[in-house]
Image: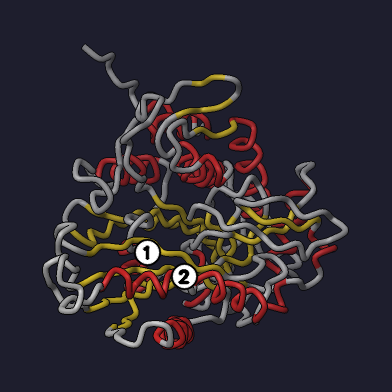
C-alpha cells in the first residue's frame, strides 16, 4: 500500500515555492492528448484555485473542454496589469527512471514529472502571488495569474483565456530557462506530404511505382534545403531555422509496391516566418526533387503551426526584469528559446511577454526530470521584486512587432547572450547561433 499523499493545504499555508512545487508534482496532470492514461489538469487546477482563493484572489476557472480547465486569478486594481503565466499539463511518464509523482529531494534537486516543465515555475508564480496578497503595501496595479491546460499539445487553455478577454500590460511565462531572460522563441510549421505510387506485385516492376522511393528523393533534398534556410536568415539569439522528417508511413507488405507514403516534415522557424512561407519553400524543394523522379505524384499541405515571436531586447519589460535580477544578485543573461512557448500567443495578442523561470530545458520531459531548488527560490525572489516594481521607470504598452535584427537591441544593457537548450554564447559574442532544443 502506497503512503498517503501529504496534505496540500500545508504548502498553501506556508507559500514556500519548494513545498508548492512538490505538492503540484504529487498531482498527476499528464496531458490526455499525449498519453492514453493521462488524467488532465482538473485536479491540479482545482488545487491552485483553492490556494489562490484562500489567499484573497478573485479566481475564475474556465472549462475549455471536459476535464481540461484553466484559471485566471486577480488581485489589486488598475494599471499596470502584470501577468504571470504557466501551464499545468505535463508529458507522459512512460520510461521514467524515477517515481513520476513522488517528488523526492536529492542533491539539491526535486525529481518527478513536471518538476522542471513547469510545476516549479508555476510554484514560483503562486509563491509570488501569496507574498503580494499578504503584503500588498506599495504594490501598484493588478496582478493576474493565468494557469493553463494543454500547452504540451494545442494550447487550448491559453487560447480560450485570450478569447475570453485575458489581457495585460506586461507578462512573464515561467518556462524553464535556467533563469535566463528569453524575449524570442522559434516557431514551427508541419508540412504534410502524400506521395502516390501504384500497387503491384513485387516481381512486376514494370507495373508498380514505389511511393516510398518517391518520398526518398525529397528526404535526400532536406540537407540542401536546411542549408538554404540558414544562409537566408540568422537570428542573433535563435540562430537559423531547421527542418527534419518527423514521421513517415507507407506500404503494406514487403512484396507489394507501396501505393502511398505519407511524410510529415517539421520546420523550426524564426520570428516573421509564417506557414505560407514555409509551405511554399517546401513545394519548391519537392519540385526540384521531382527533377530526379519524373513519375512523382505528391500533394503538400500545411499542418499544425505555431509562430516564432519576439520583443526587442531593449524593451522596458526586459530592462525591468534585468534590474530585478541584478538587485537579487544575479547577472541577467539574454537568451533565445529554441522551443515554441505560449509567450508567442501573448505577444501576438499585443501583450509584451518573455520567458523566465527555474529549470533547464535539457531536463524537461526526461526519464529523470528534476529542477534545482536554488533556482526555484531565486526565480521567486526575482519575480516578486519585479512584480512589486510595476510602474517604476517602466513604460508599458503593446508588444513591439520586431524583426529578427531587433532582438539584439542593447544586449549589453541586459547582460550576456545565450540560447536556452543550447550551447552558451560568450558575453563578447552575443550572436553565436543556437542549437535546436527539444521543444
Residue at (67, 56) in percent of width and height? 419
Task: Point out residue 378 in the picture as x, y percentages from the top left corner.
Answer: 66, 39
Residue at (39, 53) in percent of width and height? 147
Q: Quadrant of residue 337?
A: bottom right
Task: Point out residue 67 in the picture as x, y percentages from the top left corner.
Answer: 19, 51
Do the numbered discs 2 and 1 sit on residues whose CB atoms are within 8 Å? no
For numbered disc 2, what is the local secondary structure? helix
Looking at the picture, tell me which residue is in the foreground, 3 or 380.
3
- The outermost residue toward the top is 1
Task: Point out residue 99 in the picture as x, y percentages from the top left corner.
Answer: 36, 24
Residue at (76, 52) in percent of width and height? 332
Residue bearing mark 2: 220
Q: Is residue 173 visible?
A: yes
Q: Is residue 13 visible?
A: no
Q: Quadrant of residue 311?
A: bottom right
Q: Is residue 425 above or below residue 46?
A: below
Q: Is residue 26 above or below residue 199?
A: above
Q: How is the image coloured?
A: secondary structure
Residue at (60, 42) in percent of width and height? 380
**Callout in the foreground (2, 1):** 2
Task: Point out residue 260 in the picture as x, y percentages from the top left corner.
Answer: 20, 72
- In 3D space, how far apart are the residues under numbered discs 2 and 1 (Cα atoms)? 38 Å
Residue 68 as seen in the image, left or right of residue 335: left
Looking at the picture, tell me which residue is in the foreground, 277 or 119.
277
| Labelled disc at residue 303 | none
- The outermost residue toward the right is 428
Residue bearing mark 1: 158
Amino acid at each position: 500500500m502506497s503512503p498517503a499523499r501529504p496534505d496540500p493545504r500545508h504548502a498553501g499555508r506556508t507559500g514556500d515555492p519548494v513545498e508548492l512545487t512538490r505538492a503540484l508534482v504529487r498531482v498527476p496532470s499528464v496531458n490526455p492528448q499525449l498519453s492514453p492514461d493521462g488524467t488532465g489538469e482538473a485536479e491540479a487546477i482545482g488545487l491552485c484555485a483553492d490556494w489562490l482563493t484562500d489567499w484573497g484572489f478573485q479566481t475564475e476557472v474556465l472549462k475549455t473542454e471536459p476535464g481540461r480547465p484553466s484559471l485566471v486569478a486577480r488581485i489589486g486594481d488598475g494599471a499596470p496589469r502584470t501577468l504571470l503565466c504557466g501551464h499545468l499539463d505535463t508529458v507522459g511518464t512512460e520510461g521514467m527512471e524515477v517515481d513520476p509523482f513522488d517528488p523526492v529531494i536529492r542533491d539539491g534537486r526535486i525529481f518527478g514529472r513536471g518538476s522542471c516543465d513547469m510545476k516549479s515555475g508555476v510554484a514560483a508564480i503562486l509563491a509570488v502571488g501569496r507574498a503580494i496578497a499578504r503584503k500588498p503595501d506599495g504594490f501598484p496595479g493588478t496582478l493576474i495569474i493565468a494557469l493553463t491546460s494543454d500547452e504540451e499539445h494545442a494550447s487550448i487553455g491559453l487560447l480560450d483565456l485570450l478569447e475570453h478577454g485575458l489581457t495585460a500590460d506586461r507578462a512573464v511565462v515561467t518556462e524553464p530557462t535556467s533563469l535566463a531572460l528569453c524575449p524570442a522563441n522559434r516557431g514551427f510549421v508541419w508540412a504534410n506530404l502524400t506521395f502516390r505510387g501504384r500497387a503491384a506485385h513485387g516481381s512486376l516492376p514494370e507495373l508498380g511505382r514505389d511511393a516510398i522511393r518517391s518520398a526518398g528523393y525529397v528526404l535526400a533534398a532536406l540537407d540542401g534545403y536546411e542549408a538554404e534556410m540558414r544562409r537566408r536568415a540568422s537570428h542573433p539569439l535563435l540562430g537559423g531555422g531547421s527542418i527534419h522528417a518527423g514521421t513517415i508511413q507507407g506500404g503494406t507488405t514487403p512484396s507489394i509496391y507501396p501505393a502511398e507514403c505519407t511524410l510529415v516534415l517539421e520546420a523550426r522557424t524564426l520570428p516573421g516566418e509564417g506557414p505560407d512561407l514555409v509551405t511554399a519553400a517546401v513545394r519548391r524543394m519537392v519540385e526540384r526533387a521531382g527533377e530526379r523522379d519524373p513519375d512523382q505524384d505528391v500533394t503538400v499541405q500545411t499542418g499544425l503551426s505555431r509562430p516564432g515571436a519576439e520583443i526587442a531586447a531593449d524593451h522596458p519589460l526586459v530592462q525591468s526584469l534585468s534590474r530585478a535580477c541584478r538587485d537579487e544578485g544575479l547577472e541577467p543573461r539574454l537568451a533565445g528559446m529554441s522551443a515554441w512557448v505560449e509567450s508567442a500567443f501573448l505577444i501576438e495578442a499585443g501583450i509584451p511577454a518573455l520567458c523566465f523561470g527555474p529549470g533547464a530545458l535539457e531536463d524537461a520531459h526526461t526519464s529523470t526530470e528534476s529542477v534545482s531548488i536554488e533556482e526555484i527560490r531565486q526565480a521567486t525572489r526575482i519575480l516578486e521584486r519585479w512584480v512589486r516594481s510595476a510602474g517604476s521607470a517602466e513604460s508599458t504598452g503593446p508588444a513591439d512587432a520586431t524583426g529578427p535584427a531587433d532582438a539584439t537591441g542593447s544586449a549589453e544593457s541586459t547582460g550576456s547572450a545565450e540560447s536556452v537548450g543550447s550551447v552558451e554564447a560568450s558575453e563578447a559574442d552575443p550572436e553565436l547561433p543556437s542549437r535546436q532544443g527539444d521543444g
